Image (tube, grey):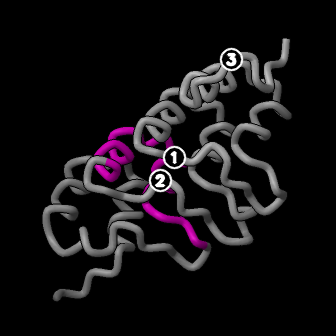
């Protein structure tokens, strides 16, 4: 093994460099796909926070876990929480399509569903309802 730690994946996400992300994941970095930095951020979390949707898709296609929460500095939020806070509906949908957990609470005990309700984000609630196969649950009209 080389000197890869997974930090390279986070850097590729920061710079939204899809080509670099692909190259890294074709090599030894794939073994560190869920690496967390000292604040608990993964490359998936970083892709969401930096609006790097191309890198996010590549990571998810290679099996990255969309449910790993960051550490206390980021209130133990998951990438899905971050997508809601940043109003990134396309990224939100992508995370859901790869199995992001809409019920996993953050450090405040809020699930992504509850966060969207608190922020009165009907578009997100509708997407979550469709994902769950329910209608009208938590709807804010």
Q: Which residue is drawn at 34% across and 81% down?
A: 5
| Secondary structure beneath label 1 | loop
- Occupied quadrant, residue 6: bottom left
- Occupied quadrant, residue 3: bottom left
Q: Are marks 1 and 2 in contact (CB under 8 Å)?
A: yes
Picture coordinates of residue 108 (x, y %)?
Answer: 84, 58
Q: Nearer the viewer, residue 129 or 35?
A: 129
Picture coordinates of residue 137 (x, y %)?
Answer: 76, 24
- Mark on residue 135? 3
The residue range painted magenta reads: 40-60
Q: Which of 40 and 94 is in front in this view?
A: 94
Q: Main secondary structure of the magenta part?
A: helix
Circle 1 residue: 100
Q: In this view, does 19 lie to the left or right of 131?
A: left
Disc 3 or 2, which lies upstream in sequence? 2
Q: Nearer the viewer, residue 64 or 40?
A: 64
């Amino acid at each position: 093994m080389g000197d890869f730690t997974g930090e390279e994946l986070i850097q590729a996400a920061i710079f939204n460099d899809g080509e670099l992300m692909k190259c890294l994941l074709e090599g030894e970095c794939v073994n560190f796909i869920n690496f967390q930095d000292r604040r608990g951020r993964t490359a998936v979390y970083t892709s969401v926070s930096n609006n790097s949707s191309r890198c996010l898709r590549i990571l998810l296609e290679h099996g990255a876990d969309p449910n790993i929460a960051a550490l206390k500095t980021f209130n133990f939020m998951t990438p899905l929480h971050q997508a809601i806070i940043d109003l990134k509906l396309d990224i939100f949908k992508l995370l859901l399509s790869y199995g992001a957990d809409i019920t996993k609470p953050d450090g405040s005990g809020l699930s992504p569903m509850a966060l969207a309700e608190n922020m009165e984000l009907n578009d997100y609630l509708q997407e979550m309802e469709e994902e769950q196969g329910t209608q009208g649950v938590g709807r804010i009209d």
